[in-house]
Image (cartoon, helix red, strand yellow):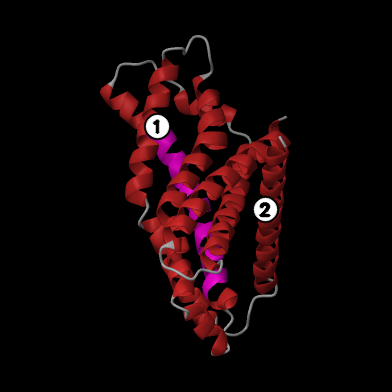
Amino acid sequence: MKRFVGALGRKTIQSVNRLMDLCALTYRLAGIALPLPRTGRVLIRRVVVEQVYFTAVQALPVIIPVALIIGTMMIIQFSQLSGQVDLGKLVVLLILREIGPLITAIIVILRSATAVTIEMSYMNVLNEIDALEMAGIDPLHALCFPRLVGITSAIVSLILVFDLMAIIGGYAIVKGVTILPVEGFFQQIAKGVVGSDITVGILKGIFFGVTITVTCLYHGLSRKSQITQVPVATSRAAVDCFFYCLVINIFISFIFYV
């Protein structure tokens, strides 16, 4: 019993310390953003554009089919209950508020978050981070801040794309290949959407982007001595990102809708 309590206490302390480290890293990055740095703007802009291209543009071939599949499945299933439920409002509740942001975050975690963790980890193991510091370049300024801006912007944009494709694309597929009763679908959507739904989607995208980026940077920049530690850090980063996004999703939904 004592061993169990001791192990639980140590695990709790480690989790709290990691959470405090994440908050400290977020604070450091926010300090770089406000005010905007005057030096190295060309480099920052280039890294931000590259990160947005990798995270958002190259993810479109994944996001769009997934959104179409989910939107089509939901409309097909719920249209069979059209006499019992408001189809448009139900789609808004599920896609705009919950499914869209979460699925987008999961895809970004699988594609970009793991890539950022691996990149930072290899730079750490190969002493490239130390080389930047010896050259007088702040790694947070040159490497971390542009990725924070790029990934956060990409997630917000991808959430909007996912929602539009799931609703409009799903409706077009159902209307074109089935005979299910989906008349008046967009009128129901218009009645079901309120300003808070759009606000919640954008807020979740921003918080997901910051959380995913900071978590991956933290695991990537953690001190490593061997390359064999890189896969372990990548796995932990992906799991932590997923867990934190779930907690944030529940927290924001609770604030706005409970």
Q: Nearer the viewer, residue 95 or 103?
A: 103
Is residue 228 in sight in this rendering? yes
Is residue 182 in sight in this rendering? no
- State the image quarter where residue 139 is shown: bottom right
Instruction: Name the amino acid type tagged 1.
Output: Ile
| 214 up-or-down from 93: above or below | below
- The residue located at (64%, 43%) in the rendering is 248
Instruction: Name the amino acid type tagged 2.
Output: Gln
176 horizontally vs 223: left or right: left
Magenta stretch in the rendered image: 143-169
Magenta region, main secondary structure: helix
User: Disc 2 on helix, strand or loop?
Assistant: helix
| 68 up-or-down from 36: above or below | above
Whether 154 is among the magenta residues is: yes
- The residue located at (60%, 46%) in the rendering is 244
Q: Position of residue 13 (x, y in %)?
A: 72, 51
